[in-house]
Image (cartoon, grey):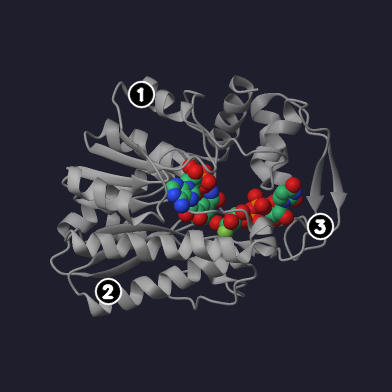
Amino acid sequence: MNIFVTGCTGYIGSHTCVELLNAGYNVIGLDNFSNSKREVLDKIKQITNKKIKFYEGDMLDESILDKIMNENNIDVVVDFAAYKAVGDSVVKPISYYINNVSSVLTLIKVMQKHNVKKLIFSSSATVYGKQDIMPITEEMPIGNTTNPYGTSKLFVEHILNDLSIADPEFKIIVFRYFNPVGAHPSGLIGENPNGIPANLMPFIAKVATKELECLSVFGDDYDTLDGTGVRDYIHIVDLAKAHLNGINKLNNMNEGGLLVYNLGTGKGYSVLEMIKTFEKVNNVTINYKIAPRRSGDIDTCYADSSKASKELGWTASLNLEDMCKDAYNFVINNK
Ligand code: NAD
Ligand code: UFG
């Protein structure tokens, strides 16, 4: 079976390609390296002993999508290509809407032209905005996003919903990821943001290696057990494996439609719990200080992932210690 993966050298894309190749799928990949490095392709080969059929190009370019569909008998598309930096999206909203929304429109147009009608789309817990009740289920209302990145994901969800009504042959899965962290246990691929990381786990890892001096804990006066923000961290390998379950589901759907699944562990951990676990598992000290709240942050966010468990047969199996161990292993291997 031929799976077309957009954004295949990115953080989630690369780990998913590894799982797809290990499971025996043929992987056709596209990336423009706007947020990843070509060397990831070699790393994927090192891990799996198999190769992606890779195309360098931009998802906004209809002709390369056409070429890929012409040259490969694509069964399923898994779409990861997008910009994802929340702060950056506030400064450059239009480039986020073009890259994250127009690219999907182009993709759908080409898929329809080539009669490829199975799609997995990478959405985010950010579409839920601030919810008062935890855990978050898929039935809870979406909207009230707090930044253009989140709004771009929300728009695409609406577009896909409209598409599934207008073209009932389309089989679509929308995955709402919670907080993917960690790295492949080989230490060969992982999250390698350019510059100073905006997210917690890569920041902690760089404080551990002394590349960064001190972690700012954004707020200790939230309505949580220890006052710091609580999130549902999920190991990247667990998250990647969910895409195999998603593909099975698409292949077994009797009719078209759109299905939405949360991907998380169902457990929330605070920033201080993250720091403590990281220190214990890796035998390091994390230098941190309490800083003011970060604008747009919420107290608590964790998933009810029971729908994915019931309908896809998927549950996360790796714990917070695995996440911290593999995140550190990756940074010390890639300093
Ligand atoms: P990433 O930036 O590591 O990977 C995205 C990849 O897509 C990169 O390799 C980039 O070069 C490529 N890309 C971007 N625009 C492109 C374009 N126009 N044409 C071709 N390639 C393009 O991000 P990630 O963490 O792997 O995220 C993958 C998807 O999951 C994104 O859609 C993101 O919004 C979504 N997501 C991520 C998180 C997270 O915390 N990492 C959470 C929720 C949702
Ligand atoms: N935090 C710190 N210091 C830091 C970075 C983060 O204290 O230097 C705290 C935040 O305040 C928050 C928690 O750590 O309480 C997690 O923050 P992240 O930035 O790692 O993750 P977010 O939950 O804010 O957002 C991430 C992605 C979004 C995505 C969301 C849900 O950045 O794009 O998860 O998937 F939408």
In the image, taking residue 91 as reference, residue 71 lies left or right, namely left
Q: Is residue 334 above or below residue 299?
A: above
**Residue under the point 31% across and 67% down:** 259
Q: Residues within 10 Å of mark 3 (few under 14, many from 20)?
A: some
Give how far across and how far down residue 292 sits, in percent: 86, 57
Which residue sits at x=58%, y=24%?
A: 329
Q: Quadrant of the C terminus?
A: top right
Tag 3's secondary structure? loop
Q: Quadrant of residue 167?
A: bottom left
Q: Is residue 135 visible?
A: no
Residue pointed to by mark 3: 219
Query: In which image quadrant can residue 111 be found?
Result: bottom left
Amino acid type of the residue that numbered disc 1 sits on in the rendered structure: Lys
Q: Which residue is mark 1?
A: 45
Q: Find out if the beta carbon at label 3 lies less than 8 Å from the nearest ligand 2 atom.
A: yes
The amino acid at mark 3 is Gly
Which quadrant holds residue 7?
Answer: top left
| Mark closer to the chain start, 3 or 1 | 1
Q: Gap in Å between the C-alphas at discs 3 and 1?
A: 42 Å
Q: Where in the figure is residue 258, as x and y percent of width and height?
A: 29, 69
Q: Position of residue 310 (x, y in %)?
A: 30, 60
- Which residue is nearer to you in this view: 23 or 301? 23
Q: Which residue is mark 2?
A: 164
First reached walking from the N terminus: tag 2 or tag 1? 1
The residue depicted at 38 percent of the width and 58 percent of the height is 121
Q: Amino acid at mark 2?
A: Ser
Q: Secondary structure at mark 1?
A: helix
Label 3 or label 2, whichever lies nearer to me, is: 2
Vertical comparison of 124 with 199: above or below: below
